Amino acid sequence: MAEREVDIAILGAGSAGLSAFRAASRHTDSVALIDPGPLGTTCARVGCMPSKLLIAAAEAAHAVHEAPLFGVHPGPLRIDGREVMARVRSERDRFVGFVLDDIAAIEARHRIEGRARFTGPQRLRVDLNDGGTLDLHARRVVIATGSHPALPAEWRAALGERLIVNDDVFDWQDLPASIAVVGAGTIGLELAQALHRLGVRVRLLGRGTKVGPLSDPELQALGATVFEAALPLQREAAVTSVEREGGGVRVRWHTPQGEHEESFDLLLAATGRTPNIEALAPAAAGLTLDEHGVPAFDPHTLQIGRGPVFIAGDVNVDRPLLHEAADEGLIAGDSAGRSLTAGLDALPPQPRRTPLAIVFSDPQIALAGLSHRQLCAAGTRFGTGRVSFANQGRSRVIARNVGALHVYGELGTRRLLGAELLGPAAEHLAHLLAWSIQRGETVDAALAQPFYHPVIEEGLRTALRELRKALDARATQPCEGCEPGE
Ligand SMILES: Cc1cc2nc3c(=O)[nH]c(=O)nc-3n(C[C@H](O)[C@H](O)[C@H](O)COP(=O)(O)OP(=O)(O)OC[C@H]3O[C@@H](n4cnc5c(N)ncnc54)[C@H](O)[C@@H]3O)c2cc1C
Ligand SMILES: NC(=O)c1ccc[n+]([C@@H]2O[C@H](COP(=O)([O-])OP(=O)(O)OC[C@H]3O[C@@H](n4cnc5c(N)ncnc54)[C@H](O)[C@@H]3O)[C@@H](O)[C@H]2O)c1
């Protein structure tokens, strides 16, 4: 068995691991980047990029479908599933290719192709892809192993290859005729709506009342109404049985309205993700996992306790988004590198960006800064500025006048704290809001910025004016609808 010593071992060459490698390499040349593959990152291979490619095709189909509203009649819509999927795959491959080029540019002595697990606090065993084994002594370890789809084991046993996850969708040669999508979180909503718009018979089953990540009760209720109108969605749907039926699947579920059953070609499980940590044998490194299956860590150093192990990206479950994974990788790699000389006890905390999350549904959903739930949980005294997009000028002009925006500001300081929205151009409005929040701006400073006419940002101005009124009147948010203890 081969043996080796390194200063820093990085487990996983995804978005977090690659950032960690770059940051760690500024401190020492003795860095090993370990991954069994397939390489190319979740984001580029089976996540952000291919899902947005599928959504882009769906938006094109939807634009044709909606064109008669403007008096434009393009003729019968024909969707060629093979062509749709060919573009998704080829553009996906292009994005993956860039990542593979970056990895290939890393000197071979730094790269280890294999699957790592702990055998001791600073010891790793790597099952090499070539069949060999490597025992590695690493002074520091960065865990950046990502996550995998979580799905009920009994569904896999019952459905075999008819049960799919997001990874499978992006390798399709053609679109299926029908699909049940279980889980109305971010992945379920994005993929179900895209497939629906591409002519696939879809049924999206959400087990709760909520659709997507909105936490503001008013917006949650609006979101449920909007998405129930936009696609075949059933909420409070508990799947009671799944079984093979001919070449497809038979799904039965229960809702407050009664029992339901329907047949589909496939069942797509979009039921959340599990961190890739158990297989690392964390106990061997002395790491204990909390109820979410992750060890306690400092989000400003990514250090686990005061030990030699750091954890970055989706594997720590904290902020499972691409830009956060990249940031966390940088912080973890840098902290691990600094600790080689500075020791493990007082690593400098590094700043984090204002939270920002966007769902590419239609209408888009976005959260910036602190969510309504977080503000309630912290007992913050805040006011809310609201705007509906129903009669917002530019939104109506382009027939995208669906949704609403809530912006939260602190009573007293008048600082913007957070926002939640569902509506047109939410991806852009959320950036403006996140940037203002990060700069520590008050509602008055935000309103002093220029607003053109006629633009969707004028809706944001209306919400800010409403917030100013609420703060002037000292009207605080009573936190109605927040669950006890939140
Ligand atoms: C369908 C979908 C759509 C998404 N859309 C968006 C979006 O639009 N915007 C956004 O911001 N985020 C999006 N995300 C989330 C985003 O993709 C992730 O947050 C991000 O890719 C996480 O990066 P990571 O480095 O933590 O994990 P990964 O990129 O998954 O990297 C983990 C690496 O660890 C390796 N590994 C695993 N186990 C071991 C081991 N034992 N030893 C060594 N290596 C190991 C794996 O092979 C992998 O290469 C989406 C995710 C999905 C699934
Ligand atoms: N646009 C984006 O930025 C984007 C897109 C996709 C994914 N992501 C990231 O990936 C993460 C994971 O997404 P996700 O959709 O897998 O997780 P999620 O937590 O958003 O949604 C999972 C959903 O599945 C439901 N669920 C779980 N078990 C179920 C069951 N047995 N039956 C029915 N429903 C069940 C949950 O109630 C939840 O609503 C997101 O939190 C997000 O950070 C981001």
Image: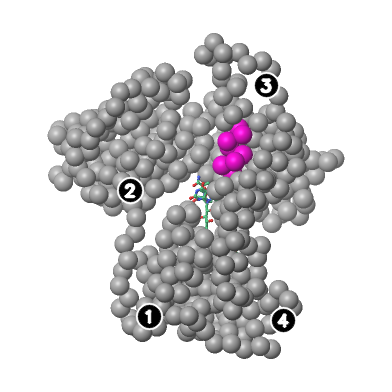
Q: Position of residue 255 (x, y in %)?
A: 60, 35
Viewer can see residue 442? yes
Which x, y percent locates residue 465? 22, 30
Are discs 1 and 2 less than 8 Å apart at CB? no
Stretch of the chain drawn in magenta = 51-58
Question: Can you give x and y, in whole percent of width and height, for residue 474 in the image?
Answer: 16, 37
Residue 266 got which mark?
none
Q: Nearer the viewer, residue 291 or 105?
A: 105
Direction top: furthest residue: 71
Seen from the viewer's position, the closer of residues 361 and 329 is: 329
Q: Quadrant of residue 68?
A: top right
What amino acid type is highlighted by mark number 1?
Ser
Residue 187 is covered by the magenta coloring: no
User: Crowding near pointer 3: few (<14 within 10 Å), some, many (20+)?
Assistant: few
Residue 251 appears anywhere in the view: no
Q: Which residue is mark 2?
A: 370
Q: Earlier in the sequence, mark 3 or mark 2?
A: 3
- Measured in 3D between alpha carbons, the distance from the residue under mark 1 to the one under mark 2, in whole angstroms, is 31 Å
